[in-house]
Image (tube, grey):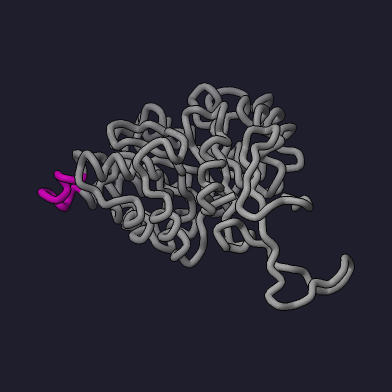
């Protein structure tokens, strides 16, 4: 975002788009700034004292309809984007030509990284039924076709580990190994295709209580095309209802495998997908854990109220955590 003169340190205002614009202070570190065209520039700081370049840019998960609504905001900086219009069976089972053409038009000028949310309705990736597995593979391969058409390099898939699995696998450890082998069998052609395309499949927690289960699954699949995703609201739900670790610990456990994060808030009662700031999550603690990672994952706002997606973005920006 370009900086405009005349702004006062620590103040904020709300622009036409509805998102908060945060004024900055300019520090010269005891040096004289060069005039325009010179070789020296002054570092720019947010109100909290962090350099702008040290504050991650928020990405966002949107359908094509919502991308059309928020397109100016998405394009104003190199913002990562996750398209969610290619996750439904209806989209993937038929001719995707019109959908892909619309997406290409809306993506014109987008400079951030692009991912797609993969299919998940009606199946788990450890499905033991060969007929169900065949449909699941076809849906995921079709989503990879969309990735190829749009230049997406990441696809979100859902973890198969349920709350039932968490407790019963402790009673019967062999079942955890069986589950991994079922996933390997179902995903084998999907992983092979993703490897050839340069697309990473990121496994998102849904009911996962054990923060390390997805990492063990990703390691067992032995592919550079498989990594881990973290949904903050899902993790808090598991923490509150089933004794899972808090979200910041989930970040630490995922470690270098973590390449994608869904940012949403909740009260732990249900999968709320509220705007950050509307629930119980400790965002400073979560972002502190994210900053300790070797590399910052994609930070994707995923809220139900996507018509007002910038509300949560403004909250995190006001805290100096993201922009």
Residue segment shown in magenta: 166-175
- Say if residue 193 shows up in the picture: no
Numbered marks: total: 0
Q: Is residue 143 left or right of residue 137?
A: right
Q: Residue at x 26, y 45 (%)?
A: 239
Residue 255 appears left or right of 78: left
Depth check: 154 or 22 in front?
A: 22
Image point (46%, 33%), residue name: 119
Viewer-proximal residue, 53 or 59? 53
- The residue at the point 56 percent across, 41 percent down is 314
Please state the horizontal and vertical placement of residue 151, each as a whole percent of the image: 66, 45
Query: Residue 22: horizontal and vertical position, in percent?
Result: 64, 48
Q: In which quarter of the view is residue 205 placed?
A: top left
Q: Is residue 249 visible?
A: yes
Most distant residue in the left direction: 171
Q: Nearer the viewer, residue 272 or 111?
A: 272
Q: Quadrant of residue 290?
A: bottom left
Tell me the chief SS of the magenta region: helix
């Amino acid at each position: 975002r370009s900086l405009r003169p005349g702004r006062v340190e620590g103040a904020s205002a709300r622009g036409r788009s509805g998102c908060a614009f945060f004024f900055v202070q300019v520090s010269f570190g005891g040096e004289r700034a060069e005039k325009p065209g010179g070789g020296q520039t002054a570092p720019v700081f947010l109100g909290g004292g962090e350099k702008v370049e040290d504050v991650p840019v928020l990405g966002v998960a949107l359908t094509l309809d919502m991308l059309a609504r928020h397109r100016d905001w998405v394009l104003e900086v190199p913002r990562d984007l996750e398209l969610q219009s290619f996750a439904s069976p209806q989209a993937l089972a038929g001719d995707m030509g019109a959908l892909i053409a619309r997406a290409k038009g809306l993506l014109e000028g987008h400079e951030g990284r692009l991912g797609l949310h993969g299919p998940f309705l009606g199946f788990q990736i450890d499905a033991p039924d060969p007929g169900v597995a065949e449909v699941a593979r076809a849906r995921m391969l079709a989503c990879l076709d969309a990735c190829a058409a749009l230049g997406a390099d990441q696809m979100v898939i859902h973890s198969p580990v349920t709350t039932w699995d968490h407790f019963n696998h402790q009673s019967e450890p062999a079942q955890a190994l069986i589950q991994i082998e079922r996933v390997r069998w179902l995903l084998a052609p999907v992983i092979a295709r993703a490897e050839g395309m340069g697309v990473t499949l990121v496994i998102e927690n849904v009911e996962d209580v054990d923060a390390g289960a997805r990492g063990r699954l990703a390691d067992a699949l032995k592919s550079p095309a498989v990594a881990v995703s973290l949904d903050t609201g899902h993790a808090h739900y598991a923490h509150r209802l089933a004794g899972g670790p808090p979200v910041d610990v989930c970040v630490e456990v995922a470690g270098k495998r973590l390449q994608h994060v869904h940012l949403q808030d909740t009260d732990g009662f249900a999968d709320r997908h509220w705007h950050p700031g509307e629930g119980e999550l400790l965002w400073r603690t979560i972002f502190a854990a994210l900053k300790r990672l070797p590399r910052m994952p994609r930070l994707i706002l995923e809220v139900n109220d996507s018509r007002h997606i910038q509300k949560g973005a403004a909250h995190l920006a006001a805290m100096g955590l993201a922009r």
